[in-house]
Image (cartoon, rainbow, N blue to C red):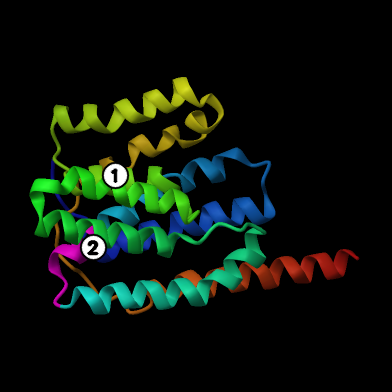
Amino acid sequence: MRSFLTNYQIKLLAASLMLIDHVGVVFFPEVYWLRVLGRLSFPLFAWLLVQGEAHTHNIWKYGLRLLVLGLISQPFFYLTFETDNLNILFTLLIGLLCLRAARTVPDVQLLTWVIGGAVASLSNVDYGAYGIALIAVIWQFRPTLLWWACWLLPHLFLLYALPDYGTFQFPVVLAPLFLQVANHQPGAKARWFYLFYPVHLLLLYLIRLGIEQNAG
């Protein structure tokens, strides 16, 4: 299969799919296909995190950026979605720490991911332990039948154990198809990428607020 997607193009795709998802949540909750498309975004963010952790020159600066932007985004996240969960940047921060710990001390990487999942659940971050598990599996991405089996089985289990959530999340199994055509080249600079998260949340909130005020 020919590889043609750069990291920049995957960033564009991930951001676009996330925006579609959030527009669906805020304005069109009854339009199911918007949420289905949105399910594909998180694995792409996970893959970009894996690439970023592997190539960053300063892991602490990378982590601090996620933390600061997560703190900036949290009020907008709360106002937009009316939830007490911590936003996805905190999920990615936990994933980043797990990736570096697993790379540094590979003998205890399973324990690292279990602890990361527990921290994600206890801190109530978006996607919780499931999100950390996705990052762990994406970290090991290989376009092989074995990897695809490891990717599919947890989602099939979710369908059985938690039918409502499992059905909602199942479209995520298609996301690695994009990774199979990634060429691992950085592509254009994307200085806007992390700022896109808090800015789009703020805009969605302001648009919804304007609609509600006009309706009232």
In the displayed structure image, the side of residue 33 where residue 42 appears, left or right: left
Main SS type for the magenta part? helix
* Residue at the right extreme, as displayed: 216
Q: From the viewer's perspective, is the residue at label 1 or at label 2 nearer?
A: 1
Q: Residues within 10 Å of mark 2 (few under 14, many from 20)?
A: many
- Label for residue 7? 2
Magenta stretch: give its range: 49-57
| Residue position marked by numbered label 1 in the rendering | 114
In the displayed structure image, the side of residue 117 where residue 212 appears, left or right: right
**Image location (x, y in percent) of residue 76:** 60, 71
Q: Quadrant of residue 34?
A: top right
Q: Would you say the residues marked 1 and 2 are in contact, meaning their CB atoms lie under 8 Å apart? A: no
Q: Residues within 10 Å of mark 1 (few under 14, many from 20)?
A: some
Identify which amino acid the numbered label 1 is placed on.
Val
- Report if residue 89 lies within the magenta region: no
Q: Secondary structure at mark 2?
A: helix
Identity of the residue drawn at 38% across and 77% down: 192
